[in-house]
Image (cartoon, rainbow, N blue to C red):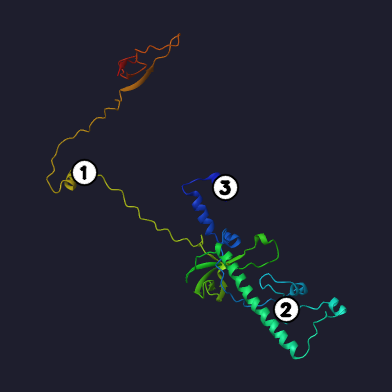
Amino acid sequence: MLGKVREGFYWVNCTTDVKEWCKKCVVCAASNGLQRHKKASMRQYNVDSPFERIAIDVAAYRSSVHKTTGQPLASIVMGRELHLPCDLKSGSTPGNDVVGEDYVSTLCQRMDDIHERVRSNTQGASDRMKETYDINANDGRYQPGNQVWLYNPQRRRGSPKLQSSWDGPYELIRQINDVVYRIQKLPRGKPRVIHFNRLAPFAGSNEEQAEAKVRPVSPPASELSFEEFMLLHSNGQKARYGGTQEPSDLFKTSPDFCLAHWRSYADKTQKLDEEKERSVFYVVTKQLSHHKPTYQNV
């Protein structure tokens, strides 16, 4: 848009004015959002709804060693490795037959040991993840009463390019913690609890322009007479009558004369006489009594 404007117009602070107008355009902001939107620092955030559908192969996930916990998921939940169909066909390995109370105590001890290692590995992985994530986090905070955009993409029929991913404006009612806010859509919407990463500052609207305050034009001041001028600037002293004459401009030519410029040129030998003046101003008289103009050296 900036390139289109510059093709036909230009004024001071053209780039700044165009960017500010685009920020306050409701249609543009709702479709594009912010170009650089930083996220908040990592904090504990409780998801209000669990996963509704799981369509993955859980066998490999339960039997493989997890990167964060350092233990297979089956060992954490059941205290043993998974038994695959091939294990049932070939039977158990020698020396693993445990029955009675020994099996229960061994299972409890094994699970306690696994859970302790999982807690230690999980805490270390969480600290490393938070430290890496918070490097590019945004330290800015919203205050109650600020207007914000809400990132709420909704897929509809048609091209997603023409659909708006941002909804608003919303008014921030209260800050619950560092990253969670309670907002309400203007003018009377239902309050919602939203994470900081889904919010963006609302710059305003071009449609809500304030009424221009027109300053009344004062009538032109009338010319003062000589008596009024002297009475105004003489501190009440009696004005003195007399004639004044404006000083003549030394560099202004009389209307009966005009200036002519003469310049010498090189001769056939392409040489100029250094002793002579190369350019001289002349006064050309315009008196009606002379049929030909007279040249007088200035």
Circle 1 is placed at which residue position? 225
| Amino acid type for the residue under numbered disc 3 | Gly
Q: Are marks 2 and 1 in contact (CB under 8 Å)?
A: no
Q: Secondary structure at mark 3?
A: helix
Circle 3 is placed at which residue position? 3
Q: Is residue 143 left or right of residue 249?
A: right
| Amino acid type for the residue under numbered disc 2 | Ser
Query: Residue pushed farthest left?
Result: 238
CA–CA distance between discs 1 and 3?
Answer: 57 Å
Which tag, 3 or 2, sits closer to the chain's start?
3
Q: Secondary structure at mark 1?
A: loop
Query: Residue pushed farthest right?
Result: 89
Q: Which residue lies at the image location 50% right of the left edge and 74% below the top edge?
A: 173
CA–CA distance between discs 3 and 2?
Answer: 62 Å
Which tag, 1 or 3, sits closer to the chain's start?
3
| Amino acid type for the residue under numbered disc 1 | Ser
Q: Quadrant of the C terminus?
A: top left
The answer to whether residue 17 is above or below residue 252 is below
